[in-house]
Image (tube, rainbow, N blue to C red):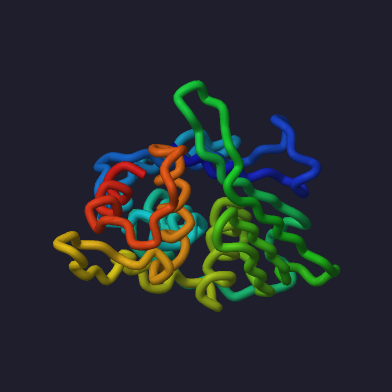
Amino acid sequence: MLRLTIHAGLLAERNDANHVAVLDIAYQKRAALADYLVALSLRHQGELEPAVVANYPRWSGSLWDLCARGLTRVLYKSDLPPPIARVDRRCAYATKLCATIQRIGADERGVQLASAEIVQPGRIRGQYQAVFQEDILGTRKAEFTYGCKFLNPADLVLRAICFALFGDGQLGKRPKLVLPASTVIEGKEVFDIEGLEEPARTGFIRHRASVAPLAKPEPLPLAQDYVDFLMRG
């Protein structure tokens, strides 16, 4: 399971007292095009009705993209959020927010995979800077304006993700499923691992090392190994 946690404050200031929202993302159907059950809990509001992100390609896009689609499904019961309201000097605002994405194991221990900070650097309401860090895909940054009458930190994080990934406050197209081009060599269907796009390439290498830690890395692995990775990795 993945867990997105949003805090009021910067990453170094995180504690149980300042978390404002938690989004849990779990498999409803584990497949190459997976279905995810998403549940959002907001401080002072409680848990919202769960929703489903359907037919989302595994190991093919940013974790932040998946979180943004999960937030959209829970908050708006739609695949797209509504347009951002016009920002004015009376809008509600946050001076600083942060977020982390963790992989939660069966023992409820978390491994951090990504983090973000969103700050209002000056005195002008609704003008933000955001920095997103991710294990495999690295760093993305965005500067944007956002404001509404009542501040929902989950929606602010959603819009910041959209600006960082797509350049505006709306979701773009979902990632396409990363599938390697295969060929038959000596009767075996194989593919060139260097032809894989990220995050699939690094994910596949790590998965193969976890299931066969003593095996010698193979530059032309079996195509079936990639299918197994998509289904189980």
Pick the front one: 194 or 133 = 194
Residue drawn at the location 32% of the way across and 48% of the way down: 229
Pick the front one: 231 or 192 = 192
Q: Residue furthest left?
A: 187
Query: Is residue 48 visible in this depiction of the protein?
Result: no
Residue 134, quarter of picture: bottom right
Residue drawn at the location 50% of the way across and 21% of the way down: 107
Q: Residue furthest right?
A: 123
Residue 218 x, y percent position in the rendering? 39, 55
Residue 141 x, y percent position in the rendering? 66, 70
Q: Residue furthest bottom?
A: 167
Residue drawn at the location 63% of the way across and 68% of the way down: 140
Residue 46 x, y percent position in the rendering? 51, 34
Residue 144, quarter of picture: bottom right
Is residue 182 depicted above or below 207 in this figure? below
Residue drawn at the location 54% of the way across and 44% of the way down: 4
Lateral position of residue 11 relative to residue 113, left or right: right
Residue 86 x, y percent position in the rendering? 59, 75
Is residue 166 depicted above or below 104 in this figure? below
Quadrant position of the C terminus in the picture:
top left
Query: Is residue 136 visible in this depiction of the protein?
Result: yes
Q: Residue furthest front?
A: 186
Is residue 147 depicted above or below 72 in this figure? below
Quadrant position of the N terminus in the picture:
top left
